[in-house]
Amino acid sequence: MQYITDLHFHSKYSRAVSQLMNLENCAEWAAKKGIQVIAACDFTHPEFFLEIKQKLEPQKIGLLKLKNSDLNVYFLLGTEISCIYSKNNRGYRIHVLVWMPNLEAVERFNAQLGWRGNLKSDGRPILGMDVKELTKIAFEVTDQAAIIPAHAWTPWFSLFGSQFGFDSLKDCFEEYTDKIFAIETGLSSDPAMNWRLSQLDNVSIVSFSDAHSLPNIGREATVFELEELSYQNIIRAIKQPIDLKNKIVYTIEFYPEEGKYHWDGHRNCNVRFSPQETLKNKEICPVCKKKVTVGVMNRVEKLADREEIKEPPKGRPSYKSLVPLQEIIAEALGQKKGTKAVNQEYEQLVKAGGDEFNVLMNIDEAELKKMTLPKIAEGVMKVHRGDIIVEAGYDGVFGTVKVWPEQEKMSEAEASGQKSLF
């Protein structure tokens, strides 16, 4: 059976995260999206871990569920940790995801980290320790732990980041490299970009949302085929991509151009460069004459030892690039995401279609037109075909994905008229 998972986002205890990000709301939105397994994230935070123990009930399968809830959503115990340290006279800032098989393992792990850093300060704690030391601690706690690099290409805080990262997995994890069996793409890269590195041939490529607000849950996700739903089988599927009983089927991706570090540039100077333009300008901003922030596409070009790959290599799962349903609705209605009209149409369409991923991936245009405005149904189909307009993000500025050229958008008056007729 197939299961859609989002195993990386944050709770209200992390900085710059919505206060609505609690266990109950996250489970509700996961069900609305069509996700069956989500992270019980930020488990290193003492207050949030207490909530996890009070509100979630362990299952025999190594996952947890909300007590007294009818939602068919499971939680996997996970967290993100920021390791900031110096090695060989150079500074590094590496974010990793840590997953644990049960509450007891989390308690032991938190106890080990508690005297190395302040776990109360942030749901994503900052620790002044080598990431390989963190890996050692995790596997000393339990051999069922899992650690993978988070958003592996982000310039400032990642394994391959242009500002404070490494050039290889081995340089980062050294003798613990064989413990690292996956990397997370992050919003600004997709699997095809990662296939270009031969050093990742034996590493699974997974994608999750890193959401800081409820509507962004599931903007990226990983779909598994599992013999039986369990923590062990999810980890086995990531570790053993050739396991026919437990495997990754595909990942659900943001268009990487929409990520806020896809291209290079300077936000304050309104300068955005492709990798070729950056090379031409010798990485110098023409406005302020300082070095530009080198983004993900440029970094992939520097580390890749293969040309661009269109189709999944043998044994690699495929992926689907989607535009979130609220963005399609907002553009069709000529309004901003989060407005009353967009939210109302989103809620009714998700209810009619079962869940968001079912609407985006499985329902044909004729059926969609029975559920929503023709313009919205058309937008979903255009995304299916990849018939969109993309402008790359850079230096912390999100890129834009447009389903229609400006002249083809509906005016607010036209949207109201269509809605009345509908």
Image: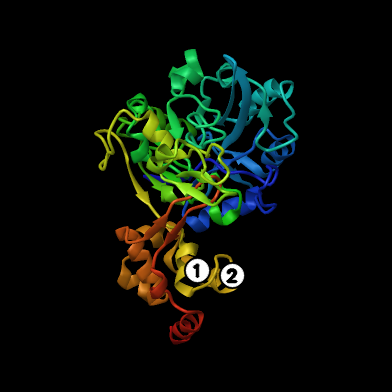
Name the residue carrying label 1: 330
Pick whichever of labels 1 and 2 is earlier in the sequence: 1
Dots 1, 2 in contact, CB < 8 A: yes
Closest to the observer: 198 or 36?
Answer: 198
Place of residue 57 in the rendered image (x, y in percent of width and height, measured from the top left): 62, 41
Numbered badge on residue 249: none
Place of residue 216 in the rendered image (x, y in percent of width and height, measured from the top left): 54, 53
Closest to the observer: 120 or 43?
Answer: 120
CA neighbours of label 2 inside 10 A, class few (<14), some (14 to 19), many (20+): few
Q: Looking at the rendering, which quadrant does residue 375 occupy?
A: bottom left
Closest to the observer: 271 or 245?
Answer: 271
Place of residue 187 in the rendered image (x, y in percent of width and height, measured from the top left): 47, 45
For residue 367, above or below residue 209: below
Residue at image point 50% right, 68% down? 330
Closest to the observer: 209 or 102?
Answer: 209
Residue at image point 67% right, 54% down? 20
For residue 101, above or below residue 408: above
Q: How many labels, in total?
A: 2
Q: Is residue 241 visible?
A: yes
CA neighbours of label 1 inside 10 A, class few (<14), some (14 to 19), many (20+): many
Q: Looking at the rendering, which quadrant does residue 49 occupy?
A: top right
Three-letter amino acid code of the residue under disc 2: Thr
Three-letter amino acid code of the residue under disc 1: Ala
- Classify the position of the N terminus by image quarter: top left
Q: Tag 1, which secondary structure?
A: helix
Q: Tag 2, which secondary structure?
A: loop
Residue at image point 49% right, 56% down? 33
Residue at image point 47% right, 65% down? 350
Numbered badge on residue 339: 2
Place of residue 100 in the rendered image (x, y in percent of width and height, measured from the top left): 56, 29
- Classify the position of the C terminus by image quarter: bottom left
Q: Cα distance, mark 1 to mark 2?
A: 8 Å
